[in-house]
Image (spheres, helix red, strand yellow):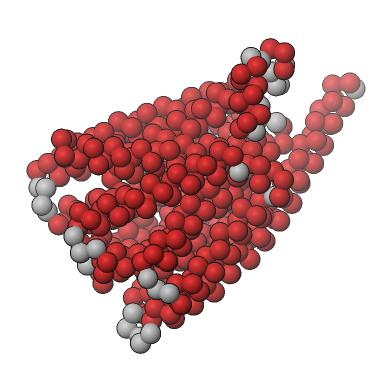
Amino acid sequence: MSVPAHATPPALRALARLFNLDPREAPAVLAGLAMFFLLFTGYFMLRPVRETMGVAGGVDNLQWLFTGTFVATVVALPLFGWVASKVARRRILPWTYGFCALNLLGFALALAAWPQSPWVARAFYIWLSVFNLLAVSLAWSVLADVFAGAEARRLFALIAGGASLGGLCGPILGTLLVAPIGHAGLLVLSALLLIGSATAAAWLHRWRDRHPLPRAAGSDADRRRPLGGNPFAGAGEVFRSPYLLGIAAFVLLLASVTTFLYFEQAQLVAATFHDRTRQTQVFGLIDTVVQALSILAQLFVTGRLAQRLGLGVLLAAVPLAMAAGFLWLALAPVFGVFVVVMVLRRAGEYALVRPGREMLYTAVPPAQKYKAKNFIDTVVYRGGDALSGWVKHALGTLGGHAALAMGLGAALALLWAGVGLGLARRQASLESRAQRAGDDAAVQEADVRTA
């Protein structure tokens, strides 16, 4: 039930209109913002260091780091699946984040003891790459579990603004603090921020308890029970569902386009800036511009765009822009052009593609929101990374490979856009079917009560 207009302070009503939300949703939005802000601040403090480690290891060896990340992801998936099967849905994120915080403390001790070890650096690169996808995927799972579809279209992008704000603050904090507290200190601080993010997620569940979901969106009592099943159930769910296979294809294409640009980034940065400090500054500057653009779009554009034009716009706009960007890079493969394309790709992903992609999961059962979603967001995504990394490496052995790679990237981006439009139509159909089922159940319950 919404708060009556006369009982809401005028300032709060004005803010609600500005950000396109119901006043009663404000506490949940703040909790979601805090969850993402703390998570991304901790991650982005460490990301520029990870990127520099990747370049320092040799541009020609990046495919090995991508392959190692994929293998580590496959190893980590059963562990997460076991947790998701045994603990209540509302406890999955706190347990997982707590374990990852312990990992960060372990790496902090290792870096303090062996600060120059290349193997610690490589292990941390791979671990952070796995953690990034797992932690972010799980935070979005909580949102898909807590909010109904209509709420998601208005609020997901707004809540994702916390991620972009954290992406702005993280590199700044990392730059200011790395000298006085060192890399090990940054990892300890990231662990504390991760615990704070888990606390915000738990509060979000408590808000939903006080404001039950509509009947068509599911039962709030179910969030207090474990999902059950086996640790590998997520993969089976994906292969049995054409809809989830479509999402997997969308993510695979997204990962392929991203990897092609990532390799181009490493090559152009290494060729343009030879000093490792300068490379880290460039990566940090790109992150800052991306997050600033993302915040503006998330706060004022994405939710209204989804509400008025539909989910298809969020899922197809960036792929179409990337198709044009790849062709531009094929004609002008210089650092300035790359920066424009990369900034548009990343800002568009954070502001449009990611919220739209997560809205797809509001129409699936709880087990798919956690297990199947995590399988897609980690194993499928990192598998796409590894596969496209080796394809890009193979193209590097051919003459004129840059133009060929950009042409292939453009073709993948067009296919990506087509898959996104098809998924948007399917999501609308599933949501409409669920709404009709909920309405029928409500009518039947009313008939029983009046009989």
Q: Confirm whether residue 302 shows in the render.
A: yes
Rendering quarter of residue 27: top right
The residue shown at (43%, 80%) is: 403
Furthest residue toward right: 451
Report x, y in % for residue 112: 12, 41
The correct choice, above or below, for 246 with respect to 202 in the image is: below
Report x, y in % for residue 127: 29, 50
Report x, y in % for residue 176: 23, 37
Q: Looking at the rendering, in which quadrant would you find the N terminus?
A: top right
The correct choice, above or below, for 285 with respect to 299 in the image is: below
The residue shown at (26%, 40%) is: 174
The residue shown at (15%, 45%) is: 111
Q: Looking at the rendering, in which quadrant would you find the C terminus?
A: top right
Rendering quarter of residue 12: top right
Q: Does residue 414 appear to the left or right of 53 in the view shown?
A: right
Q: Confirm whether residue 205 shows in the render.
A: no
The correct choice, above or below, for 372 with respect to 444 in the image is: below
The correct choice, above or below, for 408 with respect to 56 in the image is: below
Q: Does residue 193 appear to the left or right of 144 in the view shown?
A: left
Please name whichever residue, 330 or 412, is drawn nearer the observer in this view of the structure. Answer: 330
Q: Does residue 363 appear to the left or right of 442 in the view shown?
A: left
Report x, y in % for residue 392: 38, 74
